[in-house]
Image (cartoon, rainbow, N blue to C red):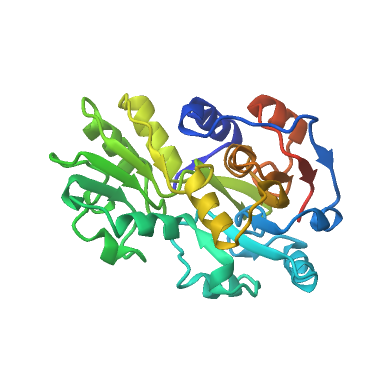
Amino acid sequence: MIEINLPILNQCYARRMNWYPAVSNPAFGYQRIGGIAEILDQFDLIMLDSYGVLCRGMTPIDGAIDAIAMMRKAGKAFCVVSNDTMTNQRVAAEKYAERGFDFSNQEVVTSLDITEQWLATLENKERWAYVAPQPHPSDELLTGMTNLNALSGIIPEGIEAILFLAGSTWTSEMLTNLVESGRGRQFELALGNPDMGAPNVIDGRIHIYATPGYFAETLTLQAEQQALPHLFGKPGKDIFQYVYEQHGITDPSRVLMVGDTLYTDILGGNAMGFKTLLLECGVYRGTDIDDAIADAGIVPDFVAPHL
């Protein structure tokens, strides 16, 4: 695992704005609220980020379980929309049950689900390498591709494309090897998880650990990659469009995207025409949210301390 800090995280996102949808902010700034209950009746579907909104690591965030129960009681449709690439719908309910949530598999969609749809149709897999630990839930679909974790990050000759899938077990040494073996070469890039980092709490303090988007950003910066990556997760449209269509929504303004990260949840939700709610209990915990919004130039419709 590679730990990074919030300034580095934000710098990485800011450097790669050309990877993401165009910024589309609300006309009149944001409204501060106490929690989602205050605005729930304005929406037909609630999309929820996972890490930093519902939980940090294995620990549920205060109020999150109660908020889910409240939405169930109100009969409000919701879906967890996560860039988690170690979990798919086949095992989602079990994973969240371990954290105290009562989701069904159908109430969770991850970028791994979207990536697996693509993998199922991908041809010429021998030209692809991928970043992910082994074993991995998608191992059957990844057959024929080269696992870079098993090669300490070194990209073999003949590889023309790289899928950045999952970051657990990836190390600083692997990242250095990735960059060095990628110099002077150009690759097609795909991001199963576009996040640059994910928050966790250890000893009461937020730690941010690098995720696949960070690895791709480092390769792009240091090995001068020209290709724009395809994003299977937020803020790319694929995952949002899938959930939107699955729920039969026709008016995007009746959808609320709830997240803790401006560059993924809020940027992506705004670009889809959804309303957005930024929570302060995730990656921006303990920071000035107004400064974060001003620095990013990305504005949510609502801000709340927690769900």
Q: Where is residue 17? Give x, y as percent.
A: 51, 28
Judge whether residue 16 can be spotted in this image.
yes
What residue is rendered at 27% in x and 59% in y?
Answer: 142
The image quadrant that residue 70 belongs to is bottom right
Left or right: residue 118 versus residue 246 is left
Q: Where is residue 159? Give x, y as percent.
A: 18, 41
Q: Which of these two is toward me, 245 or 299?
A: 245
Q: Is residue 151 above or below residue 79?
A: above
What residue is rendered at 34% in x and 58% in y?
Answer: 133
Q: Quadrant of the C terminus?
A: bottom right
Q: Residue furthest front?
A: 250
Q: Is residue 293 above or below residue 38?
A: above
What residue is rendered at 64% in x and 31% in y?
Answer: 24
Judge whether residue 288 can be spotted in this image.
no
What residue is rendered at 32% in x and 46% in y?
Answer: 163
Left or right: residue 46 versus residue 136 is right
The image quadrant that residue 80 belongs to is bottom right
Q: Where is residue 89? Give x, y as percent.
A: 48, 68
Q: Which of these two is toward me, 54 or 181?
A: 54
Q: Is residue 251 above or below residue 54?
A: above
Q: Is residue 241 above or below residue 95?
A: above
The image quadrant that residue 5 belongs to is top right
Q: Where is residue 281? Give x, y as percent.
A: 72, 49
Left or right: residue 253 versus residue 218 is right
